[in-house]
Amino acid sequence: MRGGIALLFIMFVIVTFVNAAPLNKGKKQIEISIGDIITFNGKKWQVEDKQNSRLYVCPYHGDESFYKGSDWGWFYGENCRWIEGKILTSKRQIQKKEKKHQKESIPWDRLTDDKYLSTLTANQFKQLYEKVRQIAVMDPAKEHIHAYVHMTDFMRRKALIFAHAVSDFILENPVYDMQKETGTTSWAYRFSFKVRQRERDAFLKNLKDRAGLYFFVSANCPYCKEQSKIINWFIADYEWNVISVASDFCAQEYPDCMVAPELFEVFNVQYTPSIYLIYRQKDKPLIFPVANGLTDYGTLKARIYYYLKKIKEKENNKIISPGSYYISERKIKRKITGEQ
């Protein structure tokens, strides 16, 4: 009896060993690397760090439409976390990345060391900083926050050093200083503005014998009389010759006015009030528009000054702007008087 029981026990052990041995022999642990994309709980995660069999993973939305999801984000527990690699039982759960794209482990213990950070290139630092920031946001552990804050401070100190270096270089090479004529404070700006204003006024007064304005008006124009106040103000300041050209009727507010609808056709004037600048170049005047509609005094002066400066700089350039053109005084006279 005892012999029979012993025999049965031995057979049971043998059967159990035979059945179990192939399973243990054939079972192979799934290899997972940093940078791999894994799937569990119905979502995708990216492996950011690895310690033995434990994996540190963060939500991955690289190939999915995040904003179409209704159960993503920290509210639904989608945070960076440590998980056991053992829970991955199928290779189909792992999306391997090419080796050249695999991410290296984050050296958290070195991210607060300026010497280490200084060895990184700008691109390496940028990528590492962005990675640390994302992890710190999703998992604000003390180690992650410390690394993020230190890297941010390191970056600010680097930026300050760079700013001082640029400033020192510009001081040594003032040709690159765009603020040398305007200053950097409100006091300097106000004073430089006064200087430029005096230069502009002197420039415009010196050209009173070579430059003038055509002021185009019409009887049904509701703005022309208001604009004439600006025109008369300009005449009083710079003593320019201004001819008012009316399409149908001359009001007393318009300086030196004449009815000449033909000139509207010559200059293609389609709106009143319109102001055209005249500049004499040898025997041919250069005429082009500088204002359409109501234009304030400061804007009018600035435009006239800008175009005249360009003309003076390029006396031989016939094309000043897309709307500029030459026209002879004889042609204007023929349009007004009807001469052949």
Image: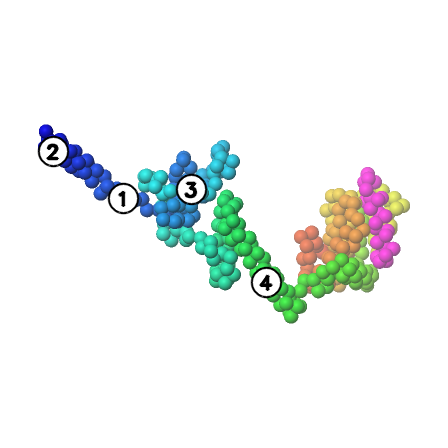
Where 4 falls versus 278 (above or below)? above
- The amino acid pointed to by label 1 is Lys
Q: Nearer the viewer, residue 245 or 185?
A: 185
| Residue 45 numbered mark, or none | 3
Q: Which mark is first along the chain, 2 or 3?
A: 2
Question: Can the viewer see residue 21?
Answer: yes
Check if mark 3's residue and mark 2's residue have beta carbons within 8 Å.
no
- The amino acid pointed to by label 2 is Leu
Q: In whole angstroms, how far apart are the C-alphas of marks 4 and 2?
A: 86 Å
| Residue 294 numbered mark, or none | none
Residue 302: x and y in percent read 76, 55
Q: The magenta stretch spans which residues?
A: 217-240
Q: In whole angstroms, how far apart are the C-alphas of marks 1 and 4?
A: 54 Å
* Left or right for 322, reference 209: left
Residue 198: x and y in percent read 81, 62
| Other residues around mark 1 within 10 Å, as few (<14) / some (14–19) / many (≥20) | few
4 vs 2, front mark: 2
Q: Which mark is first along the chain, 3 or 1?
A: 1
